[in-house]
Amino acid sequence: MSLDNVCGCSAAEEIIPLNKTNFYKKQRRVALRNCGVIDPENIDEYIAVDGYRALAKSLTELTPQDVIKIVSDSGLRGRGGGGFPTGRKWSFTAANQADQKYVVCNADEGDPGAFMDRSVLEGDPHCIVEAMAICGYATGASEGYVYVRAEYPIAVKRLEKAIEDAKAYGLLGDNIFGTDFCFNLHVRLGAGAFVCGEETALMTSIEGNRGEPRPRPPYPAVSGLFAKPTTENNVETFANIPQIVLNGPEFFNTIGTETSKGTKVFALGGKITNTGLVEIPMGTTLREIVEDIGGGIPNGRKFKAAQTGGPSGGCIPEAHLDTPMDYDSLLKIGAMVGSGGLIIMDDTSCMVDIAKFFLKFTVDESCGKCTPCRVGTRRLLEILEKITDGKGTMEDLDTMEALCYYIKDNSLCGLGQTAPNPVLSSYRHFKEEYIAHVRDKKCPAGVCKNLVQITIDPDKCKGCSLCSRKCPVGAISGEIKKPFVIDQSKCIKCGVCIDTCKFGAISRK
Amino acid sequence: MKSVEELLAIKNRVAPQVFAKSENGESYIRVLVGLATCGIAAGARPVYDALVNEIEKQGLANVHITQTGCIGVCQYEPVIEIVEDGKEKITYCKMTPEKAVRVVNEHLVNGKPVAEYTIGAVAK
């Protein structure tokens, strides 16, 4: 498709700047403010946009308690998904006395469909370096670790360069800005295990051990990395810190809703016209994201649901399109902000199939340490497979629901505790779809292969034989100029015939 | 870095370039190419190279090309942005090396933006 077809415009048309397009109009960039503006590999450019000013202000004008108060007053909550107040987290670590404390940045972005942290690290690595140093000053830590997945080679390269350049300028190291404060930063690469996004598993992995979670308490603020008090925050959380410290808490807490302050970055993807990274004030409704920023659903299809928070999150159905996107409103409807993956689904998506997809992911990624997660998610997946195969019973649905709550209540870490969420929330909002699979042995969206039949409408079929020639398994037969038929015992439901037919005679039901 | 003054000195020296401020009557044009994973995957590296070559070929001394991160419109990568003092920033998307050469010739040399490649024309 050429561009002219997409826009239907001519060269004479007025040029619209990026920030006046529908995609940008409603956005507000705090965490992403420098992405796409500065050269991420040039420390001078970061300094030119007030980089390291917040660190300078912290070290020369503020006490550690002042910094924590500013962060607390800003209302910033953890952007990795938990939503725990950042200022309070810092104050816990600050309150513990120890000979060594640590700051850890969680850049182990593992959710399918999420790429916010990668963009920040690739576009503005210095803001993470600066924020971690500020956190170190506020909590009394002199060492920091960034745990980033090895699948992000560009992010790793730019981050390592940023640390090197900051060291060369004396913005990391000893006696920063001529004060007593010393701070060093290290990068640790993760092999991409989803469980390492869980804070205790992440720290175990940094220590050089197999990335498995451990029970809490003790919380990291008491005994974290190398059994020392540790503050762990997500990339996006840190990305907000320099602006908050520099501009004061009011800059941040005047954006957003009563309980969710500031902005949130979402990685918008799936069946949506404009995919990309969007940063919006908390409390923007899902409808605004889908219809205004996202430009609606392509190909004239209908919105069905949005999946937030990836394999830990839930789905939001059309009835809740006007829900404000903030921590508490989403929890109320059984979804969560999560780390920020936002996958839009249209009416060709089967919710049981989607739940199965996410569950498969958690089954693969379960570390195996605790039984409820290791065995429970596997059994849950088997029930879902039974349902999508058309062999499910109504009792299975009850077992499925009970098992979900069991896994949630008994798993050791966040991975298991949230793994049933996609199943529970799709069951809550799309119960009729589950029942259709079980009772009527039908997949309303036509996705689950064992529950759909592809048939030829004899009234529309001209008997051209094209479909029978394209069918990879020879399931279609007939006489030229007479209606053809599909042998259901041979058909593998690949749908090639549907795409081939010039008369629209073949359909999936 | 031993003092805040040192930091401010760097800021004052580099900020005019980042914001493409003209100095002593000399205009400063900043060309940004999105070279994050999304841009590179869509083919931004050859676009970057084509820009560098063409800018050099045309001898445009006041045009400075810089890599940058993701501006958010991953779908329309590769993206080029042209920032010039006193003018609205112009965002070109779905660039190819050929289109980039045309942008250099029409926009940077002759001062006429190629409207049909801009974001407003591609995404509404």
Image (spheres, coloured by chain):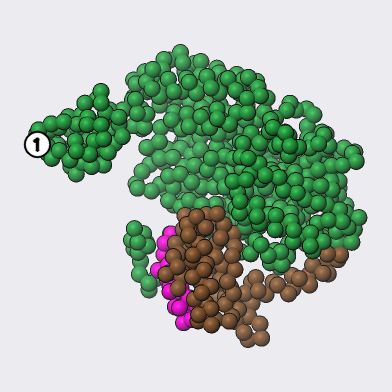
Note whether residue B48 is visible: yes
What residue type is disc 1 on?
Ile
**Disc 1 designates what residue?**
A480
Per the image, is A122 magenta?
A: no
Left or right position of A454 against B89: left
Classify 10 Å Cα crowding around label 1: few (below 14), some (14-19), many (20 and above): few
The quadrant where residue A325 appears: top right
- Residue A424 percent coordinates (x, y): 53, 26
- Residue A95 percent coordinates (x, y): 87, 39
What residue appears at the point 25 percent right and 26 percent down from the top-left corner?
Answer: A490
- In the figure, the shade used to draw chain B is brown
Quick one: which chain is green? A
**What kind of secondary structure does the magenta stretch mostly adopt?**
helix
What residue appears at the point 40 percent right and 47 percent down from the top-left corner?
Answer: A297
As drawn, A48 above or below A457 = below
- Residue A307 percent coordinates (x, y): 51, 38
Left or right position of A266 against A50: left
